Image (cartoon, rainbow, N blue to C red):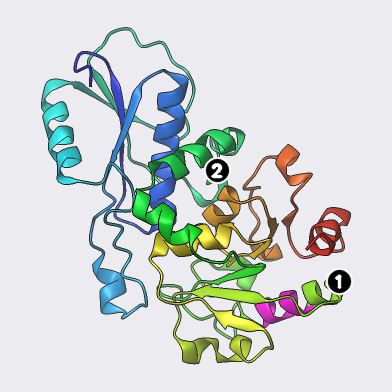
């Protein structure tokens, strides 16, 4: 490292993997556009909430990425003392005029929900390539040794609450997507396909909470993987069905080359750019020509 030159650090939030990736991604883009080195810290923070809720995943992301070690934290503290700290908003991922060296540009925010992928979608190829290059070798080996799903369905439960009978799903956030929605989408995909396509369920819910969907034929629950492996496997699906409001779902779609089916009540922005989505569908389930082609190509 050139200690005189400015650098970029993504100081990741105390949050789930999807939210951490937003802060990481904005740092990656800014560093690339300004010819600077990029580092990230905060992958290994322990979240107490998932432990107290007895979720299936404790969201502890130690040793997923090459830069996650004690040295990164020590380096960050040292640089804070020796460089000029410049907090950088997620909305500014552009090339800027850097008037002098010895700056540390710090990305720390999670974007607002209606602009999650602002500054990212137009840099999708860069981020996807950097993501996979940043993984530790054991993570690469793990997902490469597993079979890719055909239909990957992400059902977010955990800290998402159940929808009340008096609530309008379109007007609430951090709420579980109704199970019947997923069942209907699976049945509709299979109807177009004319085949009982296999379905892989990715969820932080318990088996008893998923019993209705697991009772369908050729539907299996993916279990026992690290969170990062589930994210990658979900992204490798031919068709991805997301949970509304789940950034884990959204990042799987962003990393993918798959049809991406989203709940119609919670589409506030596109995840991938329009050119990409002209080949791989993104949106609510519909009779779109692109979606039908994506399904029939399986």
Q: Are marks 1 and 2 in contact (CB under 8 Å)?
A: no
Classify residue 258 as left or right of residue 135: right
Compare residues 99 and 24 and report the one nearer the observer.
24
Q: In the rendering, at what x and y percent does residue 33 appear?
A: 47, 21
Q: In the rendering, at what x and y percent does residue 182 appear?
A: 66, 77
Residue carrying label 2: 117
* Quadrant in the picture for the C terminus: bottom right
Q: Is residue 168 visible?
A: no
Classify residue 18 as left or right of residue 297: left
**Residues packed near mark 2 inside 10 Å, few (<14), some (14 to 19) or many (20 plus):** many
From the viewer's perspective, is residue 43 above or below residue 122? below
* Residue at screen point 36% across, 21% down: 36
Q: Look at the image and give the residue range highlighted in magenta.
A: 180-187
Classify residue 186 as left or right of residue 251: right
Which dot, 1 or 2, sits closer to the camera? 1
* Residue at screen point 58% across, 38% down: 124
Measured in 3D between alpha carbons, the distance from the residue under mark 1 to the one under mark 2, in whole angstroms, is: 30 Å
Labels 1 and 2: the sequence-earlier one:
2
Q: In the rendering, at what x and y percent does residue 192 appear?
A: 86, 71
Main SS of the magenta part reads: helix
* SS at circle 2: loop
Q: Is residue 181 visible?
A: yes
From the viewer's perspective, is residue 272 above or below residue 212? above
From the viewer's perspective, is residue 208 above or below residue 111? below
Does the magenta run of residues contain 108?
Answer: no
Q: On the image, which quarter does residue 237 sit in?
A: bottom right
Compare residues 76 and 193 and report the one nearer the observer.
193
Residue carrying label 1: 192
**Residues packed near mark 1 inside 10 Å, few (<14), some (14 to 19) or many (20 plus):** some
Furthest residue toward top: 99
* SS at circle 1: helix
Q: In the rendering, at what x and y percent does residue 43 appear?
A: 29, 51
């Amino acid at each position: 490292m050139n200690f005189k030159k400015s650098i970029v650090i993504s100081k990741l939030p105390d949050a789930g993997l999807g939210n951490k990736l937003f802060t990481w991604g904005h740092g990656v883009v800014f560093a690339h556009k300004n010819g600077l080195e990029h580092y990230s810290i905060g992958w290994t923070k322990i979240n107490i909430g998932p432990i107290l809720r007895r979720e299936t995943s404790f969201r502890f992301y130690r040793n997923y990425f090459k830069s996650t070690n004690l040295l990164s934290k020590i380096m960050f503290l040292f640089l804070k003392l020796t460089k000029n700290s410049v907090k950088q908003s997620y909305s500014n991922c552009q090339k800027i005029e850097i008037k002098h060296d010895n700056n540390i540009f710090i990305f720390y925010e999670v974007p607002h929900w209606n602009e999650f992928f602002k500054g990212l979608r137009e840099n999708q190829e860069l981020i996807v390539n950097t993501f996979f290059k940043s993984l530790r070798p054991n993570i690469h080996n793990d997902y490469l040794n597993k079979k890719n799903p055909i239909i990957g369905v992400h059902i977010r439960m955990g800290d998402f609450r159940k929808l009340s009978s008096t609530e309008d799903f379109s007007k609430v956030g951090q709420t579980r997507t109704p199970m019947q929605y997923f069942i209907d989408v699976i049945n509709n995909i299979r109807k177009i396909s004319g085949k009982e396509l296999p379905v892989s369920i990715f969820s932080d819910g318990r088996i008893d909470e998923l019993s209705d969907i697991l009772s369908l034929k050729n539907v299996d629950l993916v279990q026992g993987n690290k969170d990062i492996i589930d994210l990658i496997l979900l992204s490798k699906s031919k068709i991805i069905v997301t949970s509304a409001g789940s950034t884990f779902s959204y990042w799987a779609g962003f990393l993918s080359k798959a049809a991406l089916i989203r709940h119609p009540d919670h589409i506030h922005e596109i995840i991938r750019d329009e050119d990409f989505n002209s080949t791989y569908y993104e949106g609510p389930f519909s009779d779109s020509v692109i979606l039908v082609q994506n399904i029939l190509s399986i």
